Image (spheres, helix red, strand yellow):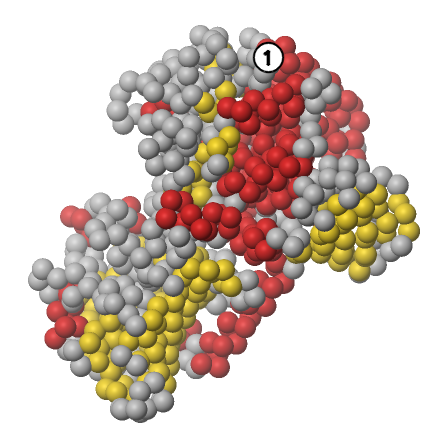
Amino acid sequence: MTYGAFDDAAKEYVIHEPGTPLPWINYLGNQDFFSLISNTGGGYSFYRDAKLRRLTRYRYNGVPGDSGGRNYYIAEGDALWSPAFSPMLTPLDDYRCRHGLGYTIFETRKNGLEAELCCFVPQEYAGEINRLVLRNTTETTKEIQIVSAVEWCLWNAVDDAANFQRNFSLGEVEVEGGAIYHKSEYRERRNHYAFHSVNHPTVGFDTSRDAFLGKFAGWNNPRTVLGGRSADSIAQGWAPIASHRIHCTLQPGESKSLIFILGYVEVSEAEKWESPNVINKKPAREMMARFATDAQVDAALRQLRGYWEDLLSNYQVRTGDEKLDRMVNIWNQYQCMVTFNLSRSASYFESGMGRGMGFRDSCQDLLGFVHMVPARARRRILDIAAIQFEDGGTWHQYQPLTKQGNADVGTGFNDDPLWLVACACAYIRETGDAAILNEPVAFNTKPGTEAPLFEHLRRSVHYTLQNLGPHGLPLIGRADWNDCLNLNCFSTQPGESFQTCANYESGIAESVFIGGMFVLYAREYAELCRLYGDAGESADILAAAQRMEEAVFAHGWDGEWFLRAYDAYGNKVGGADCEEGQIYIEPQGLCVMAGIGVKEGCAKKALDSVKERLTTEYGTCLLSPCYTTYHKELGEISSYPPGYKENGGIFCHNNPWISIAETVVKNPDEAFAVYRRTCPAYLEEKSDIHRTEPYVYSQMIAGREAATFGEAKNSWLTGTAAWTFVNVSQYLLGIIPTHEGLRVAPCLPAQFATITVRRRYRGVWYTITIENKNPGGAPRLTVDGANISGDVLPLSGQSECAVQVVIA
Ligand code: GLC
Ligand code: GLC
């Protein structure tokens, strides 16, 4: 069953039913000001940091769900409805929600009155625009009242939801004409306020939630809205809101446009006040003036569309399969931008209060983003590297506003440092900007400790080598990629964090996964050393990678697949002899990606085992069989019911590793089948089972052993976005940036006979036409009519480059 449809020409997903299985959301804003918006107008806005600078309030896990956000009410006589369906929930004569790139438009209709509500965050603007256009399609004149309402969050989202003894007394507002200002805490330590404005005379307002709603009422039956009159209330503490009331008369055929703005303003200490206790509204007025007319709004929307056209043009494909094309050309890249911006902070599953920027998460997000805005990727690499310690280890997370490591989650996730190598190498392969290696970066953000980025990479690689266990495999520490495989935590107390408690610090639990990862990324690092001046280090590291490969073979190969780990007692995890959890997905992916066992046939064997034991119609499960009891020697992984999350769920993030691994062993059919199984566009018809948005990836789909097999959770903020984009663009379609130029090595099944990729790379537009005559075979390349040897396109001096590829 579907709840909408893709409109590829408009680059939109068009939802035609407000009752989607879960709220289906979109993101507005790309730089500083962000909003989440659901298909019924729910969500919230924040400036830079979802925890510390939250503008509007949102109730996670509230009842009814998804209340809060942009509340609009249209009253015509007794008829009362909302142009985004919520909060009034009045059945509409027509409803469409168009989620586009950086904007969402609601097109709804009731009793011959058409509403179009367009929501977006303009480029370089700290605010969200909501333009509401009403059109009278009937033969009679309409008298209409429009009421808006947003509920302020008292900035710090955690205090706002917890510290009521203080925050019930904090709320302060000012009202001036069509603008309501939220200035809680501005009198003392804050240099910022927010406003909600409308470009039209108002006939009433409210700023006190209690006065607006009235007793026993909710957002779907506010007393003032039902009664037809605002209370003109001024909030004193409690819950400040901003609500405007507008009256308009619409002749037959006439339409009217109202522009509402939710804005954020920062003022310097010297300019905070207009007069005693009156905030300086000049910057806010300037912001309102920028969007006072339809022409201004239209121009900003055009600019936003142009921005996305340009970004997406860096990688465009035509394969003949519209689902594949729309994911590669539009939605997968879009999701990569969102994950790059927000890491794991704010979604409908991430509350925006907890997880800041993850070290490993942000490094991986960058892999799917670097081709879009390399300059931002560059800054990010330097930010991430700055939370590394001198011994090469690192904080696991940092707060975007302060850029300081987050002590609550701590350190010792032993895969973390190697991800820095992965993303720095990806950046240099994309841009050729090796100068980044010389950038000075501090350790643990301490001024005076700066060393070149190259040195940070060196310490990352050596960190693994300095932390080896009894089998010569890397020690796992708190956890590796799998945050829930906690081999040293031994937790028996509810409430203890599996990631930070260490009740039995064994010093011997090892990860085969990090072993594979080391082989892969140490070789990339060695290549950097060879290219940029350290041949000795290069040789040493290649030798170390070779030793690691041998250790993985000797102690990490279980006969039919790779083991996952050794636990704190030195017992195998993820082996055929284990009672449960006999095979895990991660080492099969990473070890084969690193080339381990390819010659020997073990790689193929491991992937066959994955197919036999882990593969389902909805994707590849993380492990099998699932743990049915809690194992304190394994940690959080065994805390989930079978089939959910890391306990044998389909963790979408590592499915692309298997797909890439299948390309390594030249198995195009299975490589694509793995890609297709978790790809949301192919799951659209099953939306009632899958439940999350059909245009973006989710972190997890319930696995075979779960009661709700096929049900996805945790959409949007997942490393799946970046890895699937790396997989499809670089391995299936096979356009791989290398230090020497673009390598072309597609691996697609026979159904893809002819493919065209247009790729902007180091300033050159490559148009690459691929004839897939022998799937999985060797590519033969012709550039502008001339044959070239090998599969790497020489760096070109022209601005356009036409490439013919025959897979023969
Ligand atoms: C979550 C985390 C990520 C981790 C994964 C597997 O998605 O954000 O860091 O690798 O879970 O546990
Ligand atoms: C929880 C989640 C896991 C996530 C981790 C991040 O353990 O289950 O998926 O990676 O938190 O710290």
Q: Is residue 67 visible?
A: yes
Depth check: give the residue in front, 713 or 365: 713
Name the image quarter holding residue 199.
bottom left
Looking at the picture, how far across and down is residue 542, in whole percent?
73, 22
Instruction: Tell me if 495 is positioned left or right of 331 in this view.
Output: left
Looking at the picture, how far across and down is residue 710, in whole percent?
41, 39
Q: Name the residue that disc number 1 marks.
A: 559
- Position of residue 382 relative to residue 604, above or below, is below
Instruction: Tell me if 569 is positioned left or right of 322 in this view.
Output: left
Outermost residue on the right side: it is 786
Name the image quarter holding residue 285.
bottom left
Please identify the quadrant where the C terminus is shown.
top right
Looking at the picture, how far across and down is residue 618, in whole percent?
47, 38
Q: Amino acid at mark 1?
A: Gly
Identity of the residue drawn at 16% across and 61% down: 218
Q: Residues within 10 Å of mark 1 (few under 14, many from 20)?
A: few
Depth check: give the residue in front, 558 or 190: 558
Identity of the residue drawn at 43% across and 38% down: 700
SS for tag 1? loop
Instruction: Tell me if 569 is positioned left or right of 432 in this view.
Output: left
